[in-house]
Amino acid sequence: MSRRERQRRRRRNRGGPARPLFLAIGVLTTFAALAGLGAVGWVVSVANSGPTLDTIKPLDQGAASVIYAADGSRLGFISSDVLRTPITGRQIPQVMRDATVAIEDRRFFEHKGVDFEGVVRAAVKNLESKDDVQGGSTLTMQLIRNMYTRDRVRTGVEGYKRKIREAKLAEELENQHPGRKGKRWILDQYLNNVPYGTVGGKTAIGIQAAARIFFDKPANKLTLAQAALLAGLPQAPSLYNPFLSAQAARARRDDVLRHMADQGYITQAAAARAIRSRLGVKANGYYSKKRESYFYDYVKQQLVDEYGAKKVQAGGMHIYTTLNLKMQRAARKALDDNLGGTDRSGAIVTVDPANGDLKAMASTGNYAQSKFDLASQGGYAAGSTFKVMVLMTALRRGVNPDSTTYTSMPLKFNDPTYGPIDVHTFEGTYAGRENLVKATLTSDNTVYQQLDLDVGPPNVTQTARDMGVKSPMESVPAEGLGGLKHGVSPLEMANAYATIASGGWRNKVTAVTKVCFPKRLGGFDCHVERPHRHRAFEDGVTAEATKILKENVQSGTGVRAQIGCPAAGKTGTVDDFTDAWFVGYTPKLSTSVWVGHANDRRTLGANAQGGAVAAPIWGEYMKTAHGNYCGDFPKPRQPFVSTPFFGKYSRTGVKDNQVDPGSYTTSPDKRPGIGSNGADGTGTGNGSARYPSDQYASPPQGQPTTGGGTGTTGTGGGTGATGNGTGTAGTGNGTTGAGTGAPGTGGGTTGAAGGTGAPPP
């Protein structure tokens, strides 16, 4: 072997200059492969550590609850920290989809939930910036985060783990919703669930809420420039909020428009025009504005009582109510027509006797100044409207209102149970002996006080409860005349009279007919509210009351409430004219009207009786509210059956009354509409001028007779001139009352007393 060959072989055995380099590359490649395999293993391990899509459920995204009137129009939203109104795909404009894909995920329609090109691009940027884990999340991955995980960790190893788990779930979601149709579903879900920013402490979730918050319009009315602005918000809602930084918002919007043009969604010319346009944002109160705010608050409280505050605050409900806006407008008009321009306050409430639905609840209250509702929260003395509770107590015991009589007279005595009784009629006039029908039509305080004592104030309280009155009562005689310490609300009185109108069924007042709760994956689960009713009285009893109260509207204190159709009701006036009432009903509606002052107990003015102040409002309103139905009240299935009644004051009268029988007289009929304007509580009519305490009819009491009685002439003889005496006639309306002739007089011996007159009618 030559020397040159031996040297060549030694160089081969030692290796050339490149051998160490190749060896190093080989080693690095081996380590890189091992590292890659390790990284892959780590990624797989992280992915497998997370849940699968079929083991988790979509999270409650929250939504604004909306309250509707009976006709389906919106009354308002229930306020919460989240403003969200999901809409269907047909309501989302295509321009909004295009803008979102262009700026958030340009390869959305090409990838299967994970955009590896985007991940690499984002990773390079993260390495360069050495900052948070950003970018690379597809729309599907963002939807997973918003709907399923709510995991917001962005930094370090945990940030990478989050993205890996999101990628796995995104791929599963895309497999569940394949093809173009599936992509459309995912995009629509994203647009309904992504946060667009916070305004006034309320966060707009979803495109519909964002369109309302920023532009005061529905999503389907968005322009190209507006859609571009909204599409740019989810990346950094606070940074790009146009109300906080118009300059940053404009720059972001214009960037979205350029992306849309570059990707062929719009032309360059269209992008240029949109870039030149103003932002056009509009601050508004769409989610805070309410109609019929007092009724809205009443509904919200009913929801809290039924479902709890937490569930109501969670939102997402659709609440359908009983409010009849036509009737509500008519109620407001009646109040404005009669009370507008005055310092008087008023309220009107209407309840459906068939089911307790609250049809109208209007007042003169100003919600901006006071959240206190006069109609449902106010407590006012009821005046003579509460005599109906006394009448119903008597009727349910079988007391015959035609044959049961009392003496209308001033009362001032001590009742053995309740102590001092001091009652008079409103105008100081008295009818004498009269039955309960007449006493109701004239609203005689003194007769009703005696009836109240006979049937028992605790029983009157129970009747009021059975009719639907919930306010505190003390079971004292004054309450039978409306003297309630805590008062009652117009809402209570409307429902109480509705118990009579319904034939004895007491209803639980409801303002809600249906509540729909959102399902997790769309749609609603609706709960229909059923009437809550209780049979409190036999229909024969309520029919008897209706017969009397119907006559009261036709010819009693309630004549100014006439509407040209069958109606029944009762007026009420409180001492010093502080409150005036009319509560009445038709076969289909029960309505109360209250007039007074909202903040104090000032007088309404001279002669401001319920018949003159409240009854006309009731009549004006009900002429519209009653609608086309003008039928009469139905006949009862169980006719009213009376039994003999032996009340103490009905049987024996008030023997220890302290009022001088000669100190009061009667006067002509002064019922409203018949003569001068009388008041509730005025006992009127023609009767005897005197009522000796020892002369009252004894039971059983007969039917009232007709015609007036004339005392026979009293004649007397004696020493000296003959004394000729004339008996005073007992005339007027009464029942089995006696008219006693005055003693005849003459010179010498007193003439014999005049004869007893025939019973006054």
Image (cartoon, rainbow, N blue to C red):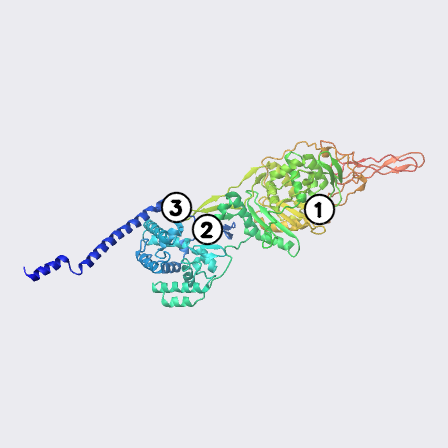
Left or right of 356: which side holds 570? right
Q: Quadrant of the C terminus?
A: top right
Q: Quadrant of the N terminus?
A: bottom left
Residue at horizontal 76 percent and vertical 44 percent from the top: 429
Question: Which one is closest to the eye, mark 3 or mark 1?
Answer: 3
Towards the viewer: 697 or 498: 498
Using a 10 Å C-alpha cutoff, classify the residue at mark 2 as few (fewer than 14 neighbours), some (14 to 19) or many (20 or more). many
- For the point 41% across and 68% down, the residue is 273
The quadrant holding residue 259 is bottom left
Q: Is residue 21 left or right of residue 485?
A: left
* First in sequence: mark 2 vs mark 3: 3
Disc 1 target residue? 575
Element on which disc 2 rests = loop
Q: Which residue in the structure is indicated by mark 3?
A: 57
Given this view, does label 2 or label 3 mark the residue nearer the observer? 3
Q: Amino acid at mark 2?
A: Ala
Q: Secondary structure at mark 1?
A: helix
Residue 409 visible from this viewpoint: no
Q: Which type of secondary structure does the marked residue at label 3 adopt?
A: loop
